Each structure stands twice: as structure tokens, then as C-alpha cells.
Image (spheres, helix red, strand yellow):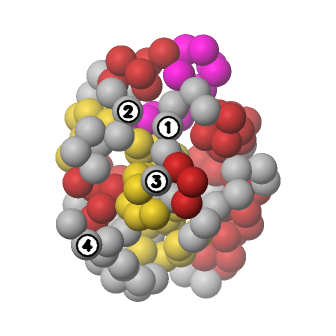
Amino acid sequence: MANTSIAEGAEAPDFSLQGSDGKKHSLSEYRGKYLVLYFYPKDNTPGCTIEARGFTAHASDIRALGAEIVGVSKDTIDSHAKFVEKQNLGITLLSDPESTTIKAYGAYGNRGIFGVGTLRKTFIVSPDGKIAKIFDKVKPVGHAEEVISALKKLKQHS
């Protein structure tokens, strides 16, 4: 499947994925607030752990800005549950085993020495369901702070 590329301002692709909280989640449930939708390669790996712990540490700041945080990888719900428990994460992780949503957001491609798979990308979806901001080639350290800064700017201009 070709890597789809979506641009800021485009309609965010819908999804319906099982979450680490035992519920199914879709884009529509986040209407009316910002959604920080981040894609990551694999549970319990160094970079992904840094990123997830960063989002957990800043979850209250992000939620205070009217946003919710959701991570997506192709890992199983069982893997997500272990990751959440082991790292004491305070965010919802969604399982996309077929990479359907990952590909719809263009977060699938060549990962260099790691082969083809999920790319580390983050999207801020606006309250009306449009892509408000895209972070390409995310560096895990300090990423949550970058997202907070972007959310503050978006809220100033809304």
C-alpha cells in the first residue's frame, strides 16, 4: 500500500481502534476538543518509552489546553496493557494490528535500518476534525513540550 500523505488543513482520517482502556475509540468521540494523535513504532522500546512517558508527565498540561492524547502502534492490546502497566502511563494507546490507520495518516514507511514500519509522527487534530499540525520525524525527548507549545499557538489563533 502506498504511503498516503496528508496535509495540514485536510480532514483527519477516521479510525475505530481498540484501546488499552478496554474501549473502542474513533475520531468522532474527540469532536469539540483537540486530539494529539501520535504514532510510534513499538511498545517498551527506548524511544517509544521516552515519548510515552513524556506525554504522561505532561498529560495534565495538555488536557488543560483542551486536548486529549492518544498513541497508536500496531502492537496488540495485550502488549499495550503491559506497556501501560510497566511504565505507569496515563494515556490511552490504540492497537492498529493491520496498520490501516497508521497508513491512512501517512505514518508508515521506510525506517532505515529498522526496515519498513510505523514512523514516529504526531498529528494535532482540531476540534472540527481537521489536521491542525503535523510533526514529522519526531524526536522523543522534549516532544511533549513541542506539542504543548503548538497547542498554545493553535488556541491563540482559534
Q: Which residue is mark 2?
A: 75
Mark nearer the N terminus (1 vs 3): 1
* 91 drawn magenta: yes
Q: Nearer the viewer, mark 2 or mark 3?
A: 3
Q: Are marks 1 and 2 in contact (CB under 8 Å)?
A: yes
Measure the alpha-carbon separation of dots 1 and 3: 13 Å
Q: Quadrant of residue 137?
A: bottom right
**Which kind of residue does numbered mark 2 sit on?**
Asp
Measure the alpha-carbon separation of dots 3 and 4: 15 Å
Looking at the image, which is closer to me, 91 or 34? Answer: 91
Q: Dot 4 lies on which element?
A: loop
Q: Residue at x 41, y 45 (%)?
A: 72
**Which kind of residue does numbered mark 1 sit on?**
Lys
Mark nearer the N terminus (1 vs 4): 4
Q: Provide residue 99's location: percent of width, then percent of height.
A: 28, 50
Q: Which residue is mark 1?
A: 42
The answer to whether residue 85 is left or right of residue 115 is right
Measure the alpha-carbon separation of dots 1 and 2: 7 Å
**Which kind of residue does numbered mark 4 sit on?**
Ala
Q: Quadrant of residue 135?
A: bottom right
Q: Which residue is mark 3?
A: 115
**Quadrant showing the C terminus:** bottom right
Q: Are marks 4 and 2 in contact (CB under 8 Å)?
A: no
Q: Provide residue 139's location: percent of width, then percent of height.
A: 70, 57
